[in-house]
């Protein structure tokens, strides 16, 4: 591989976005179904699970896939989803989606947080 090809690979390599999802559902079947749907698309790490809620972590490139998250609300209208996310470069945010009386609701906010390098600088000895 020549240097130019190597440089292109480095430029196109995405930053990891860590997504911590909190999901609640009205039934156990809905929770099992949405969890299976997520696991079919991402490698998941379950943090906590109850009969009607789950907290899990998935990794995406650059930022959360908002359209995919909205499609989960379309497919599972009884579910409430919160995605707290952080990218290696310090971008961070929260996305919330749910259905209220038949109307889909989506809300999000983003901010600049500590980058991976800043975390290491400030908190590792």
Image: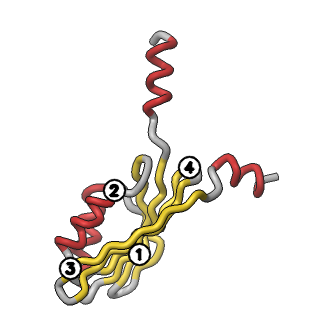
Disc 4 marks which residue?
88
Residue 37: which quarter of the image? bottom left
Which callout, 2 or 4, points at the residue further toward the start of the chain? Answer: 2
100 w.r.t. 62: above or below: below
Q: Would you call the spot at circle 2 few (<14 residues within 10 Å), some (14-19), or many (20 or more)?
A: few
Frontmost of labels 3 and 1 is 3
Among numbered discs 4 and 3, the one appearing first in the sequence: 3
Do the residues under discs 2 and 3 have CB atoms within 8 angstroms? Answer: no
Say whether residue 68 is left or right of residue 85: left
Of the two numbered discs 2 and 3 on the same chain, state the one appearing first in sequence.
Answer: 2
- Residue on which the image places disc 1: 22
SS at circle 3? loop
Q: Position of residue 104 (x, y in %)?
A: 23, 77
Residue at which label 3 appears? 77
Disc 1 packing (10 Å; few <14; some 14–19; many ≥20): some
Q: Nearer the viewer, mark 1 or mark 4?
A: 4
Of 21 and 32, nearer the camera is 21
Cα distance in 3D space between marks 2 and 3: 18 Å
């Amino acid at each position: 591989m020549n240097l130019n090809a190597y440089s292109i690979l480095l430029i196109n390599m995405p930053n990891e976005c860590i997504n911590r999802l909190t999901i609640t559902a009205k039934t156990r079947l809905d929770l099992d179904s949405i969890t299976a749907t997520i696991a079919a698309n991402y490698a998941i790490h379950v943090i906590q699970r109850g009969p009607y809620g789950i907290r899990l972590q998935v990794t995406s490139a650059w930022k959360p896939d908002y359209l995919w998250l909205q499609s989960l609300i379309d497919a599972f209208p009884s579910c409430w989803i919160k995605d707290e996310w952080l990218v290696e470069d310090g971008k961070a945010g929260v996305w919330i989606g749910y259905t209220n009386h038949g109307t889909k609701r989506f809300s999000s906010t983003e901010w600049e947080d500590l980058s991976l390098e800043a975390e290491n600088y400030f908190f590792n000895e």
